[in-house]
Image (spheres, rainbow, N blue to C red):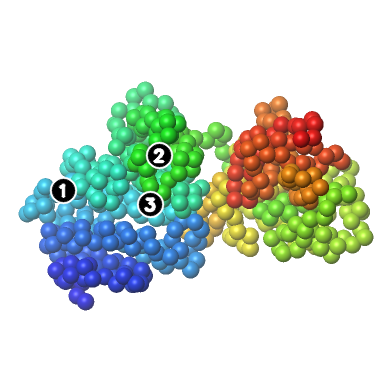
Amino acid sequence: MDYHNPAQCLGLLQNLPTDNTLERFSVLADIVAVLLSTRPLPEQHLEVLETARPLIDKTRAKLPGLDGNELLPPDGQHNELLLKVIKLWRDLSHSYALIAALDAETETLKDQRALLAQRRTYYAGKIVSEYYRAHRALPAGVWKQAHECFIAAEQEDIYSIRGSDTLNAVWKAQSAQEAYITILLLDLANAFGRSGQEWTWICRWAERFAPYCTLSTNIEGCKPMTYGLDLTADHGLRPLGLLHKDSNPRYFDCNKLASQIQSVFAQFKQGVSPSSLGLGEDCGVEPSARLLLSLYRPWGLASAGRRFPRRGSTGVVELCADWLTIGFHIQGKLFEQPRNSNQRSMTSSLGYTHDELALHAFGERAAGVETELTRNGKRNFDYQHLEAERLGLICEQWELIDQSVGGFRLQQRPHSERLSHHQLVGLHPNDGEYFLLGQVSWLMFRGDGLLETGIHVLPGLPRVIAARQRTESDDLREPYSQAFMIEASDVLQIAASLILPEGWYKTNGIVEIFDAGLERRLKMTQLLLKGPNFEQIGFMELMEPT
């Protein structure tokens, strides 16, 4: 097929292969690339691209391995396909810029100038979104390309003129400025902490809410932590206080967006569905409200969301994500059923039950282990490491990049254990006295293959307890499972909470725990935090059996 001929390309677009997504994508990408290199007449070139746009959009959505639910390392099996997709977006952005440049003399497409500017900016944004979906750091130059698109539209004074766009789910039209603000909103959305489904919603919502934001050159009276933009820099929005005034920064005004988000919450309470509000047919009320709430500060208040400043640090942090391994390192021994209770065969991710591990590693020495694990009233971590290696319940070593009161930023070249978003982990800083609980906030692969992660530390000191869900019959009680208790702290201003396996929480549900030799009944009152392998639950004590 001769992709150099626009007429033949249009014919081919009507008869694309439908049974092979990869082949379909390859044909579409080749058409765009060849036309970009051969420079056909602007109006013919534009016709082909506009015909191809919805086909490209549908095909991209079906590509295997690029749904955003798993991290894509630079050396992973889907990396080559990811780079081909990014090249397609770059070719499209350059193609619309080329059409505008070639038409500057003849002005045949004068009435399409705003549309060309929007398309150019839109596809520069798709590059940003694609890297974020894959949980990959943006390479140098990506932001500068986006800035150049907006600057070009500004210089022609067409940045605010909308062009028709059927790919825009809500407005069916978009201006270059709205396409650019969409990119800025995506950058504020904690992309590396989102699942594939969440990111799909966020991309749609960024387009939905972009018209309520503007960029202004007037920064007088703006607070230092208010977001601004330096169009000469290779990054997105930053607090104005960190930008050089010589760069003539822009103020990111989203006051109207804050009101819009508040309006959505109000309508949720009135029973209005997310689809009626332009959020999407696939959006439920609870997940939509939860996700939108997490976006309110960066999108609605346009201010830096970090509560505690980070400081550069060095050292090593030990980290593990296996449930039994976390318990072992918190208490220095394997979880065991309380005496006179039914035995439970809890299994670690290694495939062994805790009883099998204890018998294999300790034998008759189990009682002596606790003595070795504490010396002079303090945890003997050296001995604990030996026992962890014997059991196969080891922690991985992560390099500490920086830290704040609320958590750590770590890096390593990935080994055996895989992390997932919002997962519960156990961690021990090399200068710390205690083993702590944390939650994975975000994950990102750098271009050199190093994996970075942000860990939010759960406030309070955890300890291992035995817990079981209360059954209808007292004679058929479940055996105990390992769980964790975090005590209340006036200093940290936290109430006591339970860390239970995922799926245990029930409104007003009862859980029995065995702690410090005593059995207690607790009523679940609130789901505080949730991840793929845990639930943090508030509770109240029941004084009498129910």
Which percent across, then down, holds residue 387? 81, 58
Give residue 493's position: percent from left, percent from top. Answer: 67, 28
Residue 68 image position (x, y, % from top left):
46, 56
- Name the residue carrying label 1: 113
Q: Are marks 1 and 2 in contact (CB under 8 Å)?
A: no
Residue at 58% over, 60% down? 413
Res 15 → quadrant: bottom left
Whole-angstrom CA distance, mark 1 to mark 3, is 23 Å
**Dot 1 surroundings within 10 Å: few (below 14), some, or many (20 or more)?**
many
Q: Secondary structure at mark 1?
A: helix
Q: Residues within 10 Å of mark 2 (few under 14, many from 20)?
A: some
Q: Nearer the viewer, residue 310 or 506?
A: 506
Q: Quick one: quadrant of the C terminus?
A: top right
Callout 3 amino acid: Val
**As displayed, is residue 346 above or below residue 157?**
below
Label 3 packing within 10 angstroms: few (<14), some (14-19), many (20+)? many
The answer to whether marks 2 and 3 mark residues whose Cβ atoms lie closer than 8 Å is no
**In the image: residue 319, left or right of residue 214:** right
In this figure, which residue is indicated by the disc labeled 2?
273
Return the disc, 1 or 3, that comes first in the chain's sequence: 1
Would you say residue 300 is visible in this rendering? Answer: no
Point 88% across, 49% down: residue: 339
Residue on which disc 3 sits: 128
